[in-house]
Image: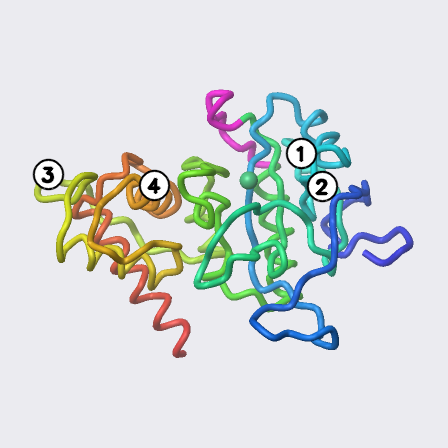
Amino acid sequence: MNQTTHPDSRFAAKIFPSPNHGERKPSGNGAGDDTPARRPDMLILHYTGMSDAGEALQWLCNPVSQVSSHYFVFENGHTLQLVPEERRAWHAGASHWAGETDINSCSIGIEIANPGHPGGLPDFPPEQIAATLNLCRDICERWAIPPERVLAHSDIAPGRKIDPGEKFPWRYFAEAGVGVWASPAPIRSGRFLARGESGQPVEALQAMFAMLGYGVTVDGVFDEALEAVVAAFQRHWRPEKVDGVADASTITTLRDLLAMTREARTA
Ligand SMILES: [Zn+2]
């Protein structure tokens, strides 16, 4: 979006400006003033978590809230641009992915109007999904955002955030080229890792999550933080059961996804 009237994406109907944004900050240590501003290379999806979409939109545009997103998608698919893509919108908060902690500086954020878990997690209407998918594809194409860097807010802030929730159609998006997906392994009874356990298998599990990108400490202790990471992973990639328990299905799905993303990175 330039200073005039045209949204950056042709899938946004118009601009509805939020004042809540700043300069994208360069990454790394010793970055000087002459370092060029970062280009977004991640796409983060959110739900608003409010019963009224209009109120959610007003909140994202209220200077008091200190939050915003680049785009806002209503239930009927109507899409607005709130913040120019070159600018740093304030949607991620304290977060972590693949060593990056200033996700706002390297991402584009989309808020999808949905009452969320507090509102009973209603289905995303088909018109809204279609509009969001078009918008995501357009953003990923124009900024060359790799599929493995299209993520949920819950992925980058597990334990703090659970949006856009386990009902978001990640599989459908991945099949359309937005995000990555490995068919979840079937859920069966058997051995599992859960909170309270410790040792080498827990350490191995933590290393796998860290390899995918999650901000986990590899210390062999299955604590509350790791439980939140397991739940975040399930919410995105094994949505049938979100319980924070690393069962065989969860671990197999994680392994398959790792193999897939590694292939993509080396291709
Ligand atoms: Zn969010």
The mark that comes first in sequence, 3 or 4, is: 3
Q: Which residues are magenta?
A: 116-127
At x 69% / y 45%, what residue is drawn? 71
At x 32% / y 59%, what residue is drawn? 257
Asked if disc 1 and disc 3 are in contact, CB closer than 8 Å, the reply is: no
> Any atom of ligand 1 within 8 Å of the CB at mark 3?
no
Q: Does residue 25 sit above or below 112 in this rendering?
A: below
Q: Position of residue 215 (x, y in %)?
A: 39, 55
Asked if disc 1 and disc 4 are in contact, CB closer than 8 Å, the reply is: no
Residue type at tag 1: Phe
Q: CA distance from mark 3 to mark 4?
A: 21 Å
Q: Position of residue 199 (x, y in %)?
A: 13, 53
- Tell me if residue 186 can be seen: yes
Secondary structure state at the residue bearing disc 1: loop
Position of the N terminus, as image quadrant, is: bottom right
Q: CA distance from mark 1 to mark 4?
A: 29 Å
Disc 3 packing (10 Å; few <14; some 14–19; many ≥20)? few
Secondary structure state at the residue bearing disc 4: helix
Q: CA distance from mark 2 to mark 1?
A: 6 Å
The mark that comes first in sequence, 2 or 3, is: 2
Q: Which is more foreground, mark 2 or mark 3?
A: 3
Q: CA distance from mark 2 to mark 4?
A: 31 Å
Residue type at tag 2: Thr
Disc 4 packing (10 Å; few <14; some 14–19; many ≥20)? many
Q: Which residue is mark 3?
A: 189
Q: Which residue is mark 1?
A: 74
Q: Which residue is mark 2?
A: 79
210 vs 149, left or right, is left
**Is-magenta flag for residue 114?**
no
Q: Does residue 68 sit above or below 23 in this rendering?
A: above
Q: Which residue is mark 4?
A: 228
